[in-house]
Image (spheres, grey):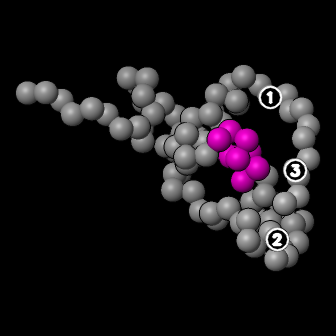
Amino acid sequence: MSQKKRFLLRLDPKLYETLERWSADELRSVNAQIEYLLTEAARKAGRLKENKQNKRSQLPTQSKFTPEQEEPLEDDTHPNSVQPPLSE
């Protein structure tokens, strides 16, 4: 198994919070979400060559969420979070 390259990445705190929520929605770690986004951007730009290794470790190609769902609701919950049932 090949090792991945490590490097330090500095992000704006608000961007990191957004990535945390997004990665939780997609059931990924923040690191995996960043790697997914970069892989998709490189693929769409035609900069990432596909090979057998890339195809085997390929991440899902579609997100189940749309950008308009990214913002928290007024009650400070995320639109896709599971809410407990209301008791009657």
Q: Which residue is mark 2?
A: 53
Few, some or many residues within 10 Å of mark 3 (<14, 14–19, 20+) = few
Q: Is residue 2 above or below residue 28?
A: below
Looking at the rendered structure, the number of numbered marks drawn on it comes to 3
Task: Give the amino acid type for the residue marked by disc 1 in the picture.
Answer: Leu
Check residue 11 in the rendering and tell me which mark sits there, or answer none.
1
Rendering coords of residue 22 (x, y %):
59, 41
Please state which of the two labelled residues, at mark 2 or mark 1, is closer to the viewer.
Answer: 2
CA distance for labels 2 and 1: 29 Å
Task: Give the amino acid type for the residue marked by disc 2 in the picture.
Answer: Gln
In this image, 23 relative to 4: left or right?
Answer: left
Name the secondary structure under disc 1.
loop
- Which image quadrant is residue 14 in? top right
Q: Which residues are magenta?
A: 29-37
Rendering coords of residue 24 (x, y %):
55, 39
Contact (Cβ within 8 Å) of mark 2 with mark 1: no
- Which image quadrant is residue 1 in? bottom right
Q: Nearer the viewer, residue 53 or 82?
A: 53
